[in-house]
Image (tube, rainbow, N blue to C red):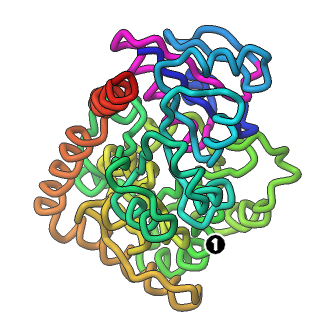
Amino acid sequence: MRIVFYDRTPVDYTPETPFLRPLGGSESAQCYLSIELAARGHSVALVTNTSSPGGYRRVQCSNHHDQGTLALLKSADIIVASNESLGRSLKDRGVDRPMVLWIGHAQDQPAIKGLESSRERKAWAGFAFVSQWQQEKFTDEYWVPVERSRVMRNAVSPGFLELAPGAPWYERGLPPVLVYTSQPYRGLDVLLDAFPAIRAAIPEVRLKVFSSFASTYATPLAEDPHAALYRRCDDMDGAEYVGAIAQPALAGELSSAAALAYPSTFYETSCIAVLEAMAAGLTVCTTRLGALPETTAGFARMVEPSHDRTKLAPAFAAATIAALSECRERPETVRAQRERQIAYVRENYAWPKRAQEWEAWLSEIVARFVA
């Protein structure tokens, strides 16, 4: 098949980018899936805001402003567009190929509000969602047709599947290291409120924050609206602000950590950060919000979400203290669950497997279109 992935966000990237520098989850997912489909013998193009067009890992990349983009879309067997309800506008420009809308957003995001129109919904041959929770929200909100929808889950970056997790921290006599790896606006403020209580109960605990809006979305650091959180982190005893780093380096950092501390205040539609922590063998402490219960599949220590930070922070601190204490008090039980967790992610959240699922579904859509 001739498959074109189409993303009009301002992010500058190619399939090589997530191996070299921080990149958002949706963008990284397109990179990994395009690489795997190309490896399976398909002709794959990735149209983004790249400043470096060319071939990367068997994927041909171009900028969506290029004059040849429209011709490329018209020549595809199928188009997979990311996070934007632009189907009707492409149809109006003469694009008559089957199109799939791959949605990572929650249903309240402006970029997909066009789905309120029946004409927009009819423009799409398929809708790909990253969780059952998300699909149900879109079905309720926009009447997205179930018969044209699929849950096509995310997966973890290759570096996390290449890890060979060794003995956990509690068996090696090491102090526990908590990590935060999501965007700063999704709960970092709550974690910083909770951390002093965690440290009071477990004085040797440390926190490393791998998070940055600026580096992930190419925003100048001086314009990062969350800079005050980073400074607060660096001023806190036992905490260290690292910033966002490339996926291979992050995998190495997480391999020696104890737990992902993620008191999410954001309605995650999937959460790759949680999946990657699970793949690295970390204990996951998070909230029961959005698709997080579905994603963590019973492996996480979860607290009820709350808009009141003064309630959420102490509840999260207590849950994290209990999780770390359990590791020391019941190491054999915790290690057995850790091994099941790692096996679960490797079995269900690898991009080569996901590419096979996409290949089968896209082939069905193309076959119906030709018929």
Residue range corresponding to the magenta coloring: 22-51
Where residue 79 appears, as percent x and y from the top left, is 52, 28
- Residue 296 seen in this snapshot: yes
In the image, is residue 34 part of the stretch drawn in magenta? yes
Location of residue 123 by image quarter: top right
At 57% from the left edge and 34% from the top edge, which residue is drawn? 246
The quarter of the rendered structure image containing the N terminus is: top left
In the image, is residue 11 part of the stretch drawn in magenta? no
- Residue 355 seen in this snapshot: no
In the picture, measured across the screen, residue 290 lies left or right of residue 230, that is: left
Location of residue 26 by image quarter: top right
Instruction: List the residue tagged with mark 1.
Output: 189
At 53% from the left edge and 18% from the top edge, which residue is drawn? 76
Where residue 351 appears, as percent x and y from the top left, is 35, 31
Q: Residues within 10 Å of mark 1 (few under 14, many from 20)?
A: many
Location of residue 216 by image quarter: top right
In the picture, measured across the screen, residue 2 lies left or right of residue 41, that is: right
* Image vertical order of residue 82 relative to residue 359, above or below: below
The quarter of the rendered structure image containing the C terminus is: top left
* Image vertical order of residue 306 relative to residue 36, above or below: below
| Residue type, numbered disc 1 | Asp
At 34% from the left edge and 44% from the top edge, which residue is drawn? 280
Q: Nearer the viewer, residue 204 or 297?
A: 297
